[in-house]
Amino acid sequence: MTPATSAYSTNKTWQALVIGRAGMDLYPQVEAGKTRDALGFSADMGGSAGNIAAALGRAGGSVGLISALSEDAIGDFVRQRLTEVQVTQDFIQTSDQHGRTSLAVAEVRTDDCEVVIYRNDAADLHWQYNDTIANAIANSHNLIVTGTSLISEPSRSATLKAIGQANASNCKVWLDLDYRPWNWPDQAATRHLYQQAAKLADVVVGNQEEFAVLTDHLQQLIQQYTARQQIILLKRGAEGCRVYMHGKCLQAGVYPVKALKPYGAGDAFLGNLVAHYTQNQDWPAAVAAGSAAAALVVAKRGCASVMPRPQDIQQLQQSMTMTPSANWT
């Protein structure tokens, strides 16, 4: 594992590769409406890995998604949307005949927001590690792993092999815990796999609930991991985030906007944080860019298609101040 605080010193093909799910999102057409009352829906690409890759693509980075999609209309929809947000499909595999690309029905409202996700024999859990992916990781600055990819085989073993390749190739590993309880058979299995992957990551990302799956003693884990030059990024919703490093902590707030929905912000945040940190190795600036991206996405309908461009982030940052600003303690 390479220390996440070191600079990106080599020229590589990819700014980042992202492992995990991408699918179709459907939103009731009536703003703030309930799914049960819907007479029509709008569609977008969703899924944590798809959204993170879209955020990186919109930020201008060279990015690829490592996953599998079904060979049907839903899979084709996702492939088309990946092209639109400048995400390469070189590492997208086709699942077997039974695998299905995920489908989510998500309400565009902040209160009582119901999100129903269909993952029957999920296609993204069918991807397999191969030489093409190994070579791509060796030529990437970052590997972003979403925890969902650890749920079952063959994705589980493939993901762990990908992390091992990244560790051996000076490719920084960002583990987004991405915990969805209905995905996992039990919490004990989840904890074991999360801990296995987290020990190999440069940066571990999650909210309070997700870190509670990883450990019962978060402060102790922070001390242990940061002593090994790993970084813990704790997302705190409307309270911003904290970035823990050995002997110091970066605390940052949010850009106050009127939200339309509660989802998509974390993916926008992480994608833009990685993009900006790779470019300048400035944690406060990268966190600020990620926070601005999160604010822009929660204020709009959709996920992948509304990931901001650099000029959108700059305009928001010029028009309002992050509260509180990013400060080291």
Image (cartoon, rainbow, N blue to C red):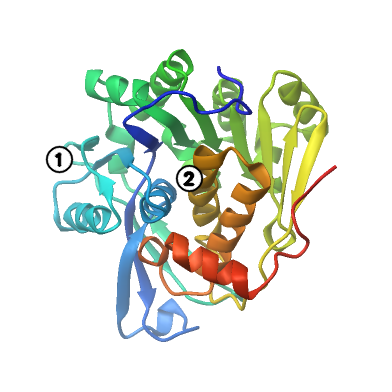
**x and y percentages locating residue 251 in the rendered image:** 77, 49
Quadrant holding the C terminus: top right
Tell me, for residue 97, which label it has, or none.
1
Dot 1 amino acid type = Gln
What residue is at 34 percent from the left and 24 percent from the top?
139
Q: Is residue 153 among the parts visible in the rendering?
A: no
**x and y percentages locating residue 73 in the rendered image:** 15, 58
Q: Residues within 10 Å of mark 2 (few under 14, many from 20)?
A: many
Q: Disc 2 designates what residue?
A: 275
**x and y percentages locating residue 142 in the rendered image:** 45, 32
What residue is at 50 percent from the left and 38 percent from the top?
278
Viewer-side residue, 121 vs 317: 317
C-alpha gap between disc 1 and disc 2? 35 Å
- In the image, is residue 107 above or below residue 213? below
Viewer-side residue, 167 vs 206: 167
Q: Residues within 10 Å of mark 1 (few under 14, many from 20)?
A: few
Q: Is residue 123 among the parts visible in the rendering?
A: yes
Numbered-mark total: 2
Label 2 sits on a secondary structure element that is: helix
- In the image, is residue 156 above or below residue 24? above
Quadrant holding the N terminus: top right
